[in-house]
Amino acid sequence: MGEVVVGISGASGAVYGQRLVQVLREKDIPVRLVVTNAGEITLKHECNTTKEELAESTGALLENDKNIGAKSASGSANIDAVVLCPCSGTTLGKLGAGIGDNLITRSAIVALKERRKLIIVPREAPYATVHLENMLKLSQWGAIVIPASPGFYNHPKTLDDIVDFVVARILDHIGIEHTLGQRWTGEEIE
């Protein structure tokens, strides 16, 4: 598998991005980590960590969000997936308008043009009509929209279980085997 770009933007839910990076690196999948300015604030506030600490603790390669010439934004680079986790409403809006003004938005637009997996994990509540319209556009263009909306049929016991539910869905769509949580078998309800 090629590299996975994980972008953390300013929406609440930085823990989803943090956990995704941890799981990918535990599986020895190369991760290029990109964090926006607003994502840095959220990562520090919600996870009590910095982008540098996250990169160092996991072995992810940290790229500068201002460097739109970085490998993550290259159409010829061996990148299999771009995951924006969480994806803020602002980032959604930029993508829906085709604006690639930072490394996260540029990487996502390149993923669309190259037909790479692009996974958007919005974490807003409620969604404004403009968010829904932009998610629809991105879905029609080939992106996969996985809202940070955990299921409860697996009877989560901890916050980690809830986070892992969403991360497991992301891994499923990237095509990465995992053992996060229990899969529905159809035999749960008699």
Image (spheres, rainbow, N blue to C red):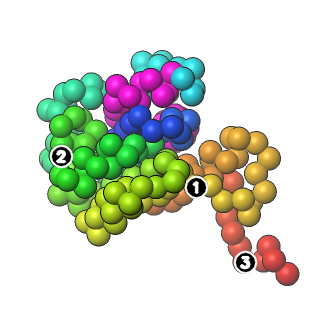
Give the residue at mark 3. Answer: 186
Q: Secondary structure at mark 3?
A: loop
Q: Find residue 141 and report its image quarter.
A: bottom left
Q: Earlier in the sequence, mark 3 or mark 2?
A: 2
* Residue 99 marker: 2
Residue contact between numbered discs 1 and 2, judged by CB atoms under 8 Å: no
Inter-mark Cα distance, 3 to 2: 43 Å
Give the residue at mark 1. Answer: 149
Residue, x 27% and y 25% (percent of image)? 64
Which percent across, then down, holds residue 173?
45, 60
Residue that lies at the very extreme toward the right in this rendered image: 190
Inter-mark Cα distance, 1 to 2: 26 Å
Q: Is disc 3 surrounded by few (<14), some (14 to 19) or many (20+) residues within 10 Å? A: few
Q: Which residues are magenta?
A: 18-44
| Three-letter amino acid code at the position of disc 2 | Ile
Residue, x 76% and y 42% (percent of image)? 158
Establish if 59 lies above or below 74: above
Circle nearer the viewer, 1 or 3:
1
Which percent across, then down, holds residue 123?
49, 47
Residue, x 74% and y 63% (percent of image)? 153
Q: Main secondary structure of the magenta part?
A: helix
Which percent across, then down, holds residue 19?
55, 38
| Three-letter amino acid code at the position of disc 3 | Gly
Which percent across, then down, holds residue 137?
28, 64
Residue that lies at the very extreme toward the bottom in this rendered image: 190
**Quarter of the C terminus within the rendering:** bottom right
| Three-letter amino acid code at the position of disc 1 | Ser
Visible in this render: residue 24?
no
Q: Is disc 1 surrounded by few (<14), some (14 to 19) or many (20+) residues within 10 Å? A: some
Establish if 181 lies above or below 50: below
